[in-house]
Amino acid sequence: MSCSVMGQLVFPSENGHKVWEDQTFIKWRKRDPHVTLRCHESLEGSLKYWYERNKVNFLAANSAVWNDDAVHGALDSAAFWVKNLPFVKSLSGCWKFFLASSPKMVPENFFDNSFQDFDWATLPVPSNWQMHGFDRPIYTNIVYPFPLDPPFVPEENPTGCYRKVFKIPKEWKGRRIFMHFEAVDSAFFTWVNGILVGYSQDSRLPAEFEITDYCRPFGPDSENVLAVQVFRWSDGSYLEDQDHWWLSGIHRDVLLLAKPPVFISDYFFKSDLAKDFSYADIEVEVIIDNSQETPKDNVLSRFTIEALLFDTKGWYESDSCADLISSKVANLKLNIKSTPLRGFHGYLLSGKLEAPKLWSAEQSTLWTRTNGIVALLASAMHLNPAYNATPNLYTLVVILKDASGNVIDCESCLVGIRQVSKAPKQLLVNGRPIIIRGVNRHEHHPRLGKTNIESCMIKDLILMKQNNLNAVRNSHYPQHPRWYELCDLFGMYMIDEANIETHGFDDSGHVKHPTLEPSWANAMMDRVIGMVERDKNHTCIISWSLGNESGYGPNHSALAGWVRGKDPSRVLHYEGGGSRTSSTDIVCPMYMRVWDIVKIANDPEEMRPLILCEYSHAMGNSNGNIHEYWEAIDNTFGLQGGFIWDWVDQALLKDTEKGKHWAYGGDFGDIPNDLNFCLNGLIWPDRTPHPALHEVKYLYQPIKISFLEDALKITNTQFYETTNEMEFSWAAHGDGVKLGSGILSVPVIEPQNSYGIEWKSCPWYTLLSSSSAEEIFITITAKLLHSTLWVEAGHVVSSTQVQLPIKGKLAPHEIKTKDGTLATETLGDVIKISKENAWELILNSRSGIIESWEVEGVLVMNKGIFPCFWRAPTDNDKGGSNSYLSLWKASKLDSLHYITESCSVQNVTDHLVQIVIVFLGVSKGGEAEKVLVKVEVVHTINSSGDVIVSCNVTPQPDLPPLPRVGVVFHLEKSVDQVKWYGRGPFECYPDRKAAAHVDIYEKNIDEMHVPYIVPSECSGRADVRWVTFQNKNGFGIYASIYGGSPPMQMSASYYHTAELDQATHNEDLVKGDNIEVHLDHKHMGLGGDDSWSPCVHNKYLIPAVPYSFSMRFRPITPATSGQEIYKTQLQN
């Protein structure tokens, strides 16, 4: 197509053809996809490049930035990624930029060199223009942000016009020049010196154009002008309906590449391991571009092709410069006699690698197999510890030489030797089944949007590794090339996913899914081919994915066929069509319930493994029930893990009158939007972990501890690594008091093996046998002995707490009334009960509410104690048309208020006062008030200061499951120090508490609050036995379980439930005049199987049936402690 015709297409007449609205026109003059090219000048240069580039570890994450400084950080990273590449130049920096409201409004001839752009704005590249004040971000989950009328897009189509002046280094003279866009959203044209160079779509893959003939003479005085026209919407947008922000622009780097006239344009490394893993046959398919040569002779008559493999492990033995060339372990020779692969028009080099060091996501090991027995030998133990515990990688270098032996071109990459294979109901890596402890990850930066920074990617990886994640699904598109290198280096299994999602077609009855339309087949295929060709040499990728939520049809069958033909060394994944079609090698459902995945795994007709591509929807205060998934996965053959949805809350930084805050859908005036459905992460946008990440780390931990009848069992669930690099320790606690601790002597445990310690041989046995504690817990911890790339030595890999069987039979908790005299006085509606100089309690006889409680003249409680059944709804409570919240509202539980039916003083002595209150919980509203729940509360006030609160709750039986059953009271703001004996120290709930150990913890009220971006029920602590609330001088209130009541759920906050319920952002919360405390006999689980249907498991629901429970309250002073008070009620 001529430039003049293309010009007409860019600026169409009224009846002109708009190529960005034609699904059959996806590219023009765009080069074929290929691996990332480095354009090295020599073998030595390539090895030095990787020697420096591989020097990454957890310290790099310290420079990760999430605020405005990230803008410069992105430019610095772009420069860093091309460092020491003499024939690669980054054009990152400040570009001239103009945003037109539509393609029709683009300035005329803006691409001409003579065009005056002095009044244009400047915009950093790479970036999304919405993150710099142009246009607005839009967040949608399913619905397209424009009318569904493929392939057409709105006339109002924001169009970014970019201009950049660049120079070609004089050292590049005689070489071919290529313009390489790493990613542009969503479609674009580009010009060099006023000449149209090409057109491309696919917002997440590179577009490369040769510009040799359009550049001005080489040298410092010859300027060239690059112009780019980017469309926010194109027909390609219909294939990019992923659940994330719609952001536009040149969001990855723009590179200039210089290559010789004949050059290496692509290469594909393959390895085939021997059955005993003693050697690997290795080969490289190499493509040579000699398209500019005239005549096009046989390349081999004038050039030679070489491929070398280097073992990088030895490079870091010492601080001195390594002898890199001596690390060569294989020399691949040109295989001229080999039968050419169908459709392959390149050159095949092959060789053999003896005793290969295999790659896995676990630490480095050397595999050998002798007489059918696998032995794991620790490899490279003499190396720098920071590099010892890393996956095994090699550096592949491909060289093109002329007839005189001079290096003409040189390319390189990291490669690993590993085998991905299938067995009945199993996915195998290196002959062994693996368990996917994974997470889905979008590219997301709160300040930059889709633009990447090296340190921020490393931050994500080290957080994943530190929390026992071993796999990532690139949701839902190919990500930055450096991400793959880092996953290779740090050890992370990966599903690489094509940039295809058409979720918005699901709700349309008038438009077919693209997968059913032949006219879309080429566009879909192009995206899959582009992903595979770019990323094919990355060892971390164990599976390709055909995309996400795009229905299922003939086009998917074609995609699957191409991938399987191109790369049979990996498995194929696609969930669409029910997760069990012929186009997937893995049964990969999303959000399937535990009982259903077990059913599939037990189906004798289904021979594929099941790996959940999405599960445990981490929206707000969520991830309940996740332990039940892992009980099933750990105990069911055929279940091999899953990927949590998802990694990071996708909020964006927004400036407001109050400062910056996390913004979500609708906060930018974006319509349509899906509100906060983008906030599904295990971490906040600044990578601060949510409390739920503790639960994930615990359930994903590789060392499992179980208590048997007469022994402690330690299991190493890893598939490749022993426990040689771990140190085990123990600690014993009785009723919260530390009884002892020490190092636990454990022999090296082989992979998939266990070690048992007889109970009487355990180092804590003698301590426990003499302890009078009611509850005894043993905690076993495994720590790393040495530093790794992702963490310092001493990091806790696994920690498990085991409760020992109770000695004998527990008697109900009771107290003995102490000597002393109570003063009781009734003045009108006020009942004043006190003990001289110790405490004073004032209760309103009409309402039954405690109006004040003073301890030694200090006011500590100013309102309480009354029933509570409501919580500020979580995102999971709100989800779906039949949500818990809708059921609660229909039953008027959200408008519940209390009428005091009666309040009577029934027993008064010198040592005891008993007050019985009957509360009626009635609904507010236009209808006649209806009693929803009746609560009888008995206050037994003792001269010791103890107040035993006994509650008998009788709800109406037709009510839905209740949010909570407990009491609420309010403390003075100064009573802000909390100490409790229960689970912690982090937030935990009945269905998300496996990671929270029982111990004594202490925090202030501010620290208790969990700042979810959208406020809801939060800050709870599960299984609390006792808790104290004290001011800085030590005066306050003690509360505990009593009688036969089980441990309670506790929360305390300056933010009252009504405030949490109403606020839409954490920054909107206003602290109350007091501290609201909830002590719950029952608290409903959080759920998390998904966030759009009621999914709290039955055992964590609170049915509307009668409940009875008791709690003990007591004044506390600096002279006493919660632990001492609690002991007085234990019946030993």
Image (spheres, rainbow, N blue to C red):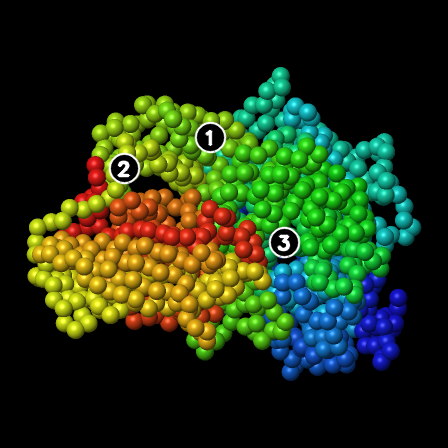
Classify mark 3: residues with Cα within 10 Å, few (<14), some (14-19) or many (20+): many
> In front: 836, or 650?
836
- How far, Cα to Cα, is label 3 from label 1? 33 Å
**Do residues under tags 2 and 3 come within 8 Å of each other at their CB atoms?**
no
- Identified by mark 3, the residue type is Ser
From the image, which quarter does the C terminus lie in? top left
> In front: 305, or 269?
269
Label 1 sits on residue: 715
Classify mark 2: residues with Cα within 10 Å, few (<14), some (14-19) or many (20+): few
Q: Secondary structure at mark 3?
A: loop
Label 3 sits on residue: 475
Q: Secondary structure at mark 2?
A: loop
From the image, which quarter does the N terminus lie in? bottom right
At x 41% / y 52%, what residue is drawn?
1105
Classify mark 1: residues with Cα within 10 Å, few (<14), some (14-19) or many (20+): many
- Identified by mark 2, the residue type is Leu
Q: Specify the quadrant of the image occupied by residue 165.
A: bottom right
Label number found at residue 803? none
Question: Sequence order check: which comes first, mark 2 or mark 3?
Answer: 3
Q: Is residue 629 above or below residue 224?
A: above
> In front: 1120, or 189?
1120
Q: Position of residue 44 (x, y in %)?
A: 64, 43
At x 46% / y 46%, what residue is drawn?
1099
Q: Which one is closest to the eye, mark 2 or mark 1? A: 2
- How far, Cα to Cα, is label 2 from label 3? 51 Å
Label 2 sits on residue: 810
- How far, Cα to Cα, is label 2 from label 1? 32 Å
